[in-house]
């Protein structure tokens, strides 16, 4: 569960990227964050990830107020979220398998657990046959699926994605969104910042629209624009 | 499971060390310079301290006669010295053979080095005990006026001089060490910064997936520690070799022998030097890597 209470973010440059944002994303929700370029979508995502601190307001994640969370506790907060970015962010010198296993290594998972879990998520995203390939040998859609597998492998309660289909052609974008929907149907909360108008319109999910840092619309089963 | 994490840290640490060979190399250079400098001054300082302790045992003046002084002249010298006020009568003559054997004893297990020397290169000398130490200077002056006197050594003077030198050596060692430590930390933190920079993408992914700072930092700390330990080992070999070489040469020098200095063997310095090296190596490695990581952990 993600709850924003009157959250504002002013960057050190003076830009107010988010102003008075208040919303609740319940466990198991699927929500799109839409808005023009520069409207503050990525800033909202960074606030959820606690990559940025809110200037004002309160952010509650999974029932816990993160406003005064000690920096040393942030890694544990992040383990409850899987993150996906537009540019995939895979490690080029590691195989698909190792890119995913890496996420388990760094949370000190047991090797036995890693050997069981990695093939499972790879099959979930449909990449079992590419386990030994390197990222550069994969298409953009496949790379994003590896990133998705990595985000899922530690069983997070939510997936946070910032323009996950931004670098993909429309067809591949659909594949990824469909996959995210499947993941959501298994109980994982999904929040996606996106510009993919057609997909948002077709999927009829919750849409939160932000304009110049202010949330101007929050529709259940909404479209990309009013 | 524990083993798996430790293995990961070590393999990542070693990978970092060899990733930036050039900067690792320059880092080794600076750290070795620091350690060698320390080793050098420490060895000198310890020897001086040792000398001072040695000489303090005997509060005596020693008068050396010229090499070719005849027995008659030696007898006359003895009478003349004993007639000086403040000198205890019955001063003791040390023959060249005795001086030679004395020297040999002091060398301990390095006695073989004496084989190439003849006792005849040592001179006769008298060991004088003073009834009044305050007269030391004036007695020496009077002895110097006598014939056939080559040199006088006085513990008091030597001790004073050595204590002063010893003190300065310690001060210089301290200051140099402090400066070199700062430079080493700077260089090592720059070296690690390069590997951190090269792997910043990996670090940011680690942070997003929920790696703790200490988990991210550990391989880089290990990188620093590995460089530190490598420097310690290299420096120890160099200092040990150079020290033994110099010490052997000095034990054979006449000046050193006549002053009666006993040079320490490297084994006697080894424990302290290795301890300081390990502390320096590990400490500089840890501090240097901690400094270089600060910026990148901020995701
Ligand atoms: N680190 C930063 N420092 C200062 N200003 C920033 C920073 N990040 C973003 N901004 C500013 O905050 C505003 C919102 O940016 P943000 O990245 O949240 O927009 P966005 O909705 O994600 O845009 P896009 O669709 O292009 O990704 C912009 O005006 C941007 O210039
Ligand atoms: Mg953005």
Image (spheres, rainbow, N blue to C red):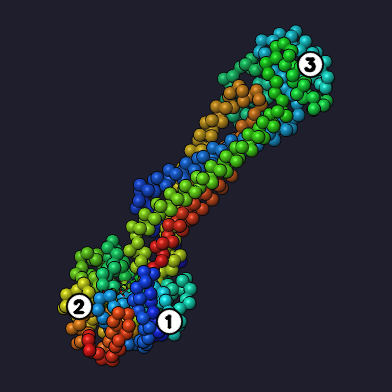
Quick one: quadrant of the N terminus of chain B?
bottom left
Q: Is residue B88 left or right of residue A23?
A: right
Residue ID at (77%, 10%):
B76
Residue B200 sits above or below residue A192 on the image: above
Query: Badge 1 sits on which subunit?
Result: A
Q: Which residue is mark 3?
A: B81
Q: Residue at x 72, y 11 (%)?
A: B147
- Ligand 1 falls in quadrant: bottom left
Q: Is disc 3's CB within 8 Å of ligand 1? A: no
Which residue bears the numbered disc 1? A57
Q: Is residue A98 above or below residue B61?
A: below
Q: Are marks 1 and 3 on the same chain?
A: no
Q: Nearer the viewer, residue A92 or A112?
A: A92
Secondary structure category for the residue under label 1: strand
Residue name at image x 72 percent, y 25 percent:
B154
Is the residue at mark 2 in contact range of ligand 1, meaning its CB lies under 8 Å from it? no
Please state the chain letter of the residue tagged with numbered disc 2 in the rendered image: A
Mark carried by residue A218: none
Pointers 3 and 2 in contact (CB under 8 A)? Answer: no
Mark 3–mark 2 Cα distance, whole angstroms, equals 109 Å
Tag 2's secondary structure?
A: helix
Nearer to us in this view, A97 or B280: B280
Circle nearer the viewer, 2 or 1: 1
- A128 vs A83, nearest the viewer: A83
Q: Position of residue A64 (x, y in %)?
A: 45, 82
Mark 2, residue position: A173
Alpha carbon distance from label 1 to label 3 = 97 Å
What residue occupies the far bottom of the structure in this picture? A220
């Amino acid at each position: 569960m993600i709850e924003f209470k009157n959250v504002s973010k002013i960057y050190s440059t003076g830009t107010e990227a988010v102003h008075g944002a208040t919303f609740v994303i319940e466990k198991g929700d699927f929500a799109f964050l839409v808005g023009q370029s520069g409207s503050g979508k990525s800033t909202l995502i960074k606030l959820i990830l606690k990559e940025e601190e809110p200037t004002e307001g309160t952010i509650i994640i999974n029932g816990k107020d993160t406003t005064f969370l000690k920096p040393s506790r942030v890694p544990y907060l992040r383990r409850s979220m899987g993150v996906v970015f537009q540019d995939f962010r895979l490690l080029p010198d590691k195989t698909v398998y190792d890119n995913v296993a890496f996420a388990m290594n760094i949370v000190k998972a047991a090797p036995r657990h890693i050997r069981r879990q990695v093939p499972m998520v790879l099959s979930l995203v449909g990449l079992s046959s590419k386990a030994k390939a390197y990222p550069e040998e994969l298409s953009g859609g496949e790379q994003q699926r590896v990133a998705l597998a990595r985000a899922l492998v530690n069983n997070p309660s939510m997936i946070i994605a910032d323009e996950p289909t931004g670098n993909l052609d429309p067809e591949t974008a659909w594949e990824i969104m469909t996959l995210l929907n499947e993941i959501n149907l298994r109980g994982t909360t999904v929040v996606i910042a996106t510009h993919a108008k057609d997909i948002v319109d077709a999927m009829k999910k919750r849409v939160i629209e932000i304009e110049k840092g202010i949330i101007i619309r929050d529709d259940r089963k909404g479209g990309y624009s009013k | 499971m524990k083993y798996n994490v430790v293995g990961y840290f070590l393999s990542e640490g070693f990978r970092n060390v060899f990733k930036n060979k050039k900067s690792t190399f320059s880092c080794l250079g600076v750290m070795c310079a620091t350690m060698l400098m320390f080793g050098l001054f420490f060895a000198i300082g310890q020897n001086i301290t040792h000398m001072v302790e040695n000489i303090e045992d005997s509060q005596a003046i020693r008068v050396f006669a010229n090499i070719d002084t005849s027995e008659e002249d030696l007898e006359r010298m003895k009478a003349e010295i004993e007639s000086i006020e403040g000198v205890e009568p019955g001063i003791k003559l040390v023959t060249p053979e005795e001086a030679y054997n004395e020297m040999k004893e002091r060398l301990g297990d390095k006695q073989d080095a004496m084989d190439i020397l003849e006792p005849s290169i040592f001179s006769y000398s008298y060991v004088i005990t003073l009834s009044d130490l305050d007269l030391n200077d004036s007695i020496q002056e009077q002895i110097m006026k006598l014939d056939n006197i080559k040199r006088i050594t006085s513990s008091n003077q030597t001790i004073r001089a050595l204590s002063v030198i010893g003190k300065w050596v310690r001060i210089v060692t301290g200051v140099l060490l402090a400066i070199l430590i700062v430079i080493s930390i700077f260089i090592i933190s720059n070296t690690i910064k390069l590997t951190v920079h090269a792997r910043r993408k990996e670090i940011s992914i680690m942070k997003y997936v929920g790696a703790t700072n200490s988990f991210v930092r550990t391989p880089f700390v290990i990188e620093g520690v590995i460089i530190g330990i490598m420097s310690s080992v290299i420096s120890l070999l160099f200092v040990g070799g150079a020290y033994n070489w110099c010490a052997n040469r000095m034990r054979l020098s006449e000046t050193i022998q006549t002053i009666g200095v006993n040079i320490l063997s490297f084994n006697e310095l080894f424990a302290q030097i290795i301890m300081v090296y390990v502390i320096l190596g590990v400490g500089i490695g840890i501090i240097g890597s901690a400094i270089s990581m600060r910026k990148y952990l901020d995701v």
